[in-house]
Image (tube, helix red, strand yellow):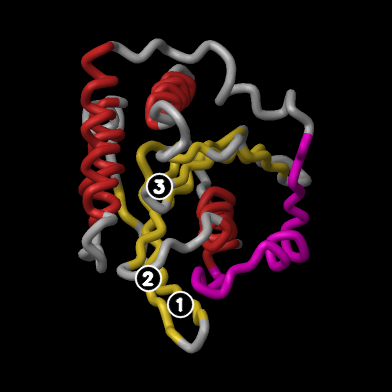
Amino acid sequence: MVQTLQAKNVTLHDLRARFGVQLVEDDQFFREWQDNLPEITDLEKQRLDRVKASYSNLLKYPPMLENTVKMVVLSPLLDLAGFYLSPFHITSEKSVEISAEDEGVMYKGQIDVLALFEQLWVTVIESKQAAFSLEVGRAQLLAYMLANPDSDKFTFGLLTNGGSFMFIKLVKQETPQYAMSKMFYIFNPGNDLYGVLSVLKRLGQLTTSK
């Protein structure tokens, strides 16, 4: 079982070698982040514009405090998507510490994994001094999704470091397969948080309709 792996040491190579996990690049495999997306209301857009402005302002005054990503960006998104209300419930997995060296400077952070529902997971990559790539958390998220015994068909996940967002779909079968959405970036023209919220709402609908 995936649970026997140390989360901080899990790599995509481990998942391929031990469980045969395959990346699917067929656009039709993961349509859920593109099709039948709910509309975002004007009030929700105003809230998300404020979230973007708040995050942008905090970047001017490094280092960020721990849990800033969850407090400033993720929590409003989860609230607007309705994930603090029944039938959803949030549980937190053990944090994974991460580090990287750049020009002699060691940057440290952590990866937090939240289970919003049996089939919907969120991975938050936090760092005080540097923004880690979403790639840092992909293997850990897939490992938790694979280990979930309550989803024998498909599972969705969200990777975020506060500024970038990517959705993942995993189909558990004899050969597990997964695909990724495009990258949503908070500083793209307009506000990509609109799209992130819309996808979150859609995945929430899908995971509770069974």
Indicate the quadrant containing the N terminus: top left, top right, bottom left or bottom right.
Answer: bottom right
**Contact (CB < 8 A) between labels 3 and 1?**
no
- Residue range corresponding to the magenta coloring: 4-25
Label 3 to label 1, Cα distance in Å?
19 Å
| Number of on-image labels | 3
**Contact (CB < 8 A) between labels 2 and 1?**
yes
Label 2 to label 1, Cα distance in Å?
6 Å
Confirm whether the magenta stretch covers residue 15: yes
Look at the numbered disc 3 and give the secondary structure of its residue: loop
The mark nearer the N terminus, 3 or 1, is 1
Seen from the viewer's position, the closer of residues 198 and 121 is 198
Q: Residue at x 43, y 83 (%)?
A: 106
Per the image, the residue denoted by label 2 is 109
The amino acid type, in three-letter code, at marker 2 is: Gly
The amino acid type, in three-letter code, at marker 3 is: Gly
Per the image, the residue denoted by label 3 is 163
Per the image, the residue denoted by label 1 is 99
49 on left or right of 2: left
The amino acid type, in three-letter code, at marker 1 is: Ser
